[in-house]
Image (tube, rainbow, N blue to C red):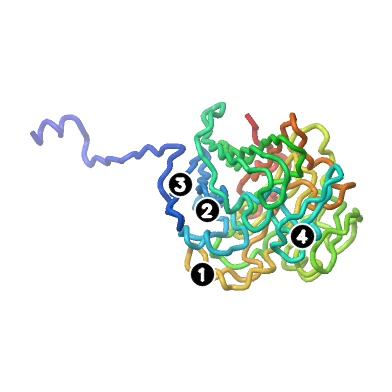
Amino acid sequence: MASYFAGLFKFPVRFELVIMVSPISSRIYGTLPGGQSIEAWTLTGRGGLVLEVITLGGIVTRLLVPGHDGILDDVVLGFNNLDSYVARHPYFGAIAGRVAGRITGAAFTLDGTSYKLAPNEPPNHLHGGLTGFDKRVWKASPAPRAGGAPALRLTYSSLDGEEGYPGNLDVAVTYTVADENAFIIETEATSDRTTPLSLTHHSYFNLSGESSGTIENHLLTIHSDQYVPVREDMTLSGRLESAVQEPNDFRESRRLGDALPQLFQRHGDLYALSDRTNNAPQLAARLEDPVSGRVMTVSTTEHYLQLYTGCHLDGSLTGKSGKPYSRFAGLCLECEGYPDASNAAMREHTLLQPGQTQRSATSYTFSVCRPGESSQSPGNPGTNHPRYD
């Protein structure tokens, strides 16, 4: 028998086990106190990007991205267990809505009717209320995509009066992992009554890895020259001001550790994005980590981008690697409509009318800048826009 195999192979022979990984799979992540099961879905892209999302809040629990050394790191803050997500946390990785951001006074008037919302950040309303979309259980199912890219469609029906908002609302959020290492988020929604609607994705990004420390050495660019100032309680003033040559001007790449002390309350501002008239995603921001070489570009159809620096993280939450999340452990780049629904002059594009479908698209595209290479050089993969199909 040995002589038979010797005739087939020239020794030594190396055998390799190839394991085929399904581009999309699911498992039970945990069970809520009321007995409802929460699923975890994993999407694996051909470019190496791996996304895990749970049906509670559409929360992105893991986002594995290759660096210049080829090693995958998890670049979003979060937890390893359902109990931590059920407990109070700062919207790690969640879908925020019906309206992301703060609504002044937790109230608005629409067509002559006043609506009182839950003042979950008294006296204001934040990210959809006490039980916003981040705390709802979404239905998940694989979604077909051209070229076979893994995609997951999350749906939720929000009843008239939920958290004080008018209208029965049907909303779908689709996550896609594209071949070019893009995490694409597409939303669509309908309502039987006029209602404000402005969703956002609330991941905290640290391109060095979620357990690596702070984002102070990251380089940030925001393609905007206007922002909305805030009051002391972080509610919006309702007016646009120029960011040009101001402390919050990120039109040119800046190291965050140098910029943070100059920002109001070290928090970050709401930036108005230009050229949002053709419904095609446009470049909004770029984030780069010189250590890992990871570059993340943000493109969106939305009118605003909220920078949040993670300034309220205080070390009281322990992350996936067993390390506490201290101040500036991760930052958010939230693409959204104008948050303050109490401002009739600014909220127009966020109002969803009966018979209409509101749609939006945002992508977080990852590339690698090798040592000594410029992330903003012509033809760098980080500047390419993903396909939305």
CA–CA distance in space, label 4 to label 1: 27 Å
Q: Residues within 10 Å of mark 1 (few under 14, many from 20)?
A: some
Pointer 2 or 4: first along the chain: 2
User: For mark 3, what is the residue?
Assistant: 39
- Residue situated in front as seen by the camera: 64 or 339: 339
- Residue situated in front as seen by the camera: 368 or 157: 157
Image location (x, y in percent) of residue 82:
47, 58
Q: Residues within 10 Å of mark 4 (few under 14, many from 20)?
A: some
- Looking at the image, do the residues carrying marks 2 and 4 touch, with CB atoms under 8 Å apart? no
Give the number of marks.
4
User: For mark 1, what is the residue?
Assistant: 323
In the image, which is nearer the foreground, mark 2 or mark 4? Answer: 2
Pointer 4 or 1: first along the chain: 4
Query: In what quadrant of the picture does the C terminus appear?
Result: top right
Mark 3: amino acid:
Glu
Image location (x, y in percent) of residue 276:
81, 38
Query: In what quadrant of the picture does the N terminus appear?
Result: top left
Answer above or below: position of 114 versus 326.
above
Mark 1: amino acid:
Lys
